[in-house]
Image (tube, grey):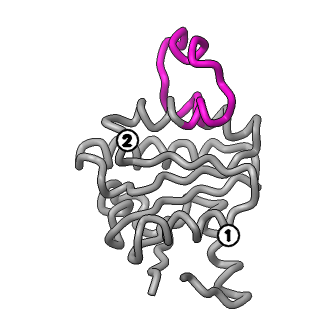
Amino acid sequence: MLDLDDSEEHMFHHGATGYGVEVYGGTPNQREAVFRKQFDEPIVVVDGRNADSSEDIVKAALLAMGTDEEDIEKMYSVGGRELRRALDETESNFVILEFDSLAKDVQTSVAQMMKGVAEQLSSDDVMLGYACNEGGAVVNAEFDLSARVRSWELE
């Protein structure tokens, strides 16, 4: 498990309220458990293994935040703007599990979208996270995140 001392926990939370934190190593269940322990409720968790596009990620998140499926289908587009709005309104923390299981082009699309979400969030309390099998998946998908997303390895 990820055992953080006080300063590391502060850095984890500071990164999560910025552009997000990446947790890698361990098993998928261990990675999810870290976020469930570190992030306050409400927390929205979307599994990348069940998504084929960034739109699938957003739709799953909107459904988890209580948006009616019919309302989602009526939206002109389903992307980062809708996700950011829902996260701000619900003050939900957001985690994408198994980010590195997404196709490479989808990883890039999702990372770029999440960069925009992070930059436009109104709430300073919303935390963002990514769970990956191997470290660096998020920053490799969007170079602009290389100095912004912190990675934590499970031992």
In the picture of the structure, the residue carrying the numbered disc 2 is 50
Q: Is residue 82 above or below residue 20?
A: above
Quadrant (top left, top right, bottom left, bottom right) of the C terminus: bottom left
Q: Is residue 103 above or below residue 61?
A: below
Occupied quadrant, residue 68: top right
Q: In this view, which residue lies farthest toward the top?
A: 74
Secondary element type, mark 2: helix
Which region is colored magenta? 61-83
Q: Main secondary structure of the magenta part?
A: helix
Between 98 and 144, the residue placed more toward the observer is 98
Residue 82: x and y in percent read 58, 28
Between 120 and 94, the residue placed more toward the observer is 94
Occupied quadrant, residue 5: bottom right
Rendered residue at 76%/47% (across/down)? 123
Crowdedness of circle 2 by 10 Å Cα count: few (<14), some, many (20+)? some
Quadrant (top left, top right, bottom left, bottom right) of the N terminus: bottom right
In the picture of the structure, the residue carrying the numbered disc 1 is 38
Secondary element type, mark 1: helix
Q: Is residue 122 above or below residue 3?
A: above
Rendered residue at 43%/60% (across/down)? 145
